[in-house]
Amino acid sequence: MARNSRQAKILEIISNKAIETQDELVSELRAANFDITQATISRDIKELGLIKIATENNKYKYAVIGNTQNPIATNKKMTIFKECVISIKTALNLVVVKTLNGTAGLVSNFIDSLSLNTILGCTYGDDTVMVVTQDVEDGKFIQSKLIELLN
Amino acid sequence: MARNSRQAKILEIISNKAIETQDELVSELRAANFDITQATISRDIKELGLIKIATENNKYKYAVIGNTQNPIATNKKMTIFKECVISIKTALNLVVVKTLNGTAGLVSNFIDSLSLNTILGCTYGDDTVMVVTQDVEDGKFIQSKLIELLN
DNA sequence: AACAATTTTGTATAAATATACAAAAACCTC
DNA sequence: GAGGTTTTTGTATATTTATACAAAATTGTT
């Protein structure tokens, strides 16, 4: 289905470029070979829980909302998790998850919500989530758990 | 000037009730004796950096955006700080700031941004910010500093 | 594969929002 | 307080966004 990859593409686009209107987003998507209309984008934006917010230069842009405020339902989060994660690696007791730029917060939030008890905590930047576990073994374990979820 | 109190009222309204459209907000404000039009609200929303976001029940509502993402300029934040703070009290090494419901995040963010070095950290809920200082003396000091800012 | 049921999408348009421009209000400065 | 300057607001409207409805696509079942 093109739908999920399209939504992932939307997250990618808005994290890399200031998108002011849905029509602008339509153009970007068309350029990336997604043949859709504004109506569909409007629905995607609602589903993804994206926001339109004022920027410093007195314009508007679409953005991914921060984790605590994000009201997207869990199965939607799961879908997004799958779409946004690029790689999952371990380094000793850390699991390093690479994501589409700008979506690390969403991914981190999702991982937190799993409440896996061998996870001590998560931090994230723009495109990286760091999952801290007790030891090397736990790191490997969490890595495999997360990879499982991608299927 | 009615403008600042109106904007504060907007923050209060949206934190207490799900507001789906600007027209709805206009009605609420009219009920609170602010005689304005949709155009003004549109501008206020832009200035306050408010967002319209999808809710669980498949509708939209306006909301205050979380602190880290908030791009409002400092002087605007200062104005909002003044408008949103209700009281500032101390309890031993804590400074307890009461705010309009839903705006504690904004206020906390503003206090953080002051980078006062006797502040150890801030936490917040919906209408309360807790500022932690080293000791009772520092608490009193920060309290007075914050009260100063209200003038 | 034929059919029914569900989901996704486009078209057309209604609904909602942003803004150009002009007027009004607030603020200065002399 | 007259006259100039800046800020705020309303009116009217252009722009943008959401959605009803129908069509198309996808999925599941036999």
Image (cartoon, coloured by chain):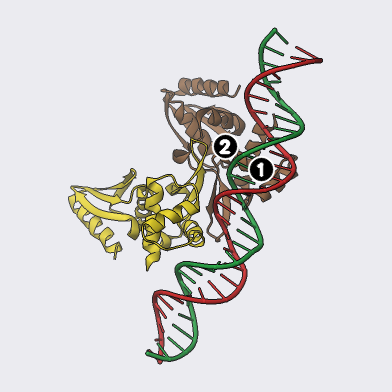
Chain colours: A yellow, B brown, C green, D red
User: What residue sits right under mark 2 in the picture?
Assistant: B47
Task: Identify residue type, mark 1.
Answer: Ala
Q: Residue at x 48, y 54 (%)?
A: A49
Sequence-first disc among 1 and 2: 1
Q: Residue at x 70, y 43 (%)?
A: B37
The quarter of the image holding the C terminus of chain A is: bottom left
State the image coordinates of residue A62 (x, y, percent, origin top left).
47, 48
The secondary structure type at the circle numbered 1 is helix
Residue A4 image-quadrant placement: bottom left
Counting other residues with Cα less than 10 Å from the Cα at mark 2, is it few (<14), some (14-19), or many (20 or more)?
some
Q: Chain of mark 1?
A: B
Q: Nearer the viewer, residue C11 or A126?
A: C11
Residue A23, labelled with which disc?
A: none
Q: Residue at x 28, y 58 (%)?
A: A146
The quarter of the image holding the N terminus of chain A is: bottom left
Indicate left or right for B26 with B73 as reference: right
Count of all numbered marks drawn on residues in the image: 2
Residue B7 visible in this rendered orientation of the protein? yes
State the image coordinates of residue A101 (x, y, percent, origin top left).
34, 48
User: What residue sits right under mark 1 in the picture?
Assistant: B39
Counting other residues with Cα less than 10 Å from the Cα at mark 1, is it few (<14), some (14-19), or many (20 or more)?
few
Q: Nearer the viewer, mark 1 or mark 2?
A: 1
Q: Is residue B128 above or below residue A22?
A: above
Do badges 1 and 2 share one subunit?
yes
What is the distance, in whole Å, between disc 1 and disc 2 at their CAs?
13 Å
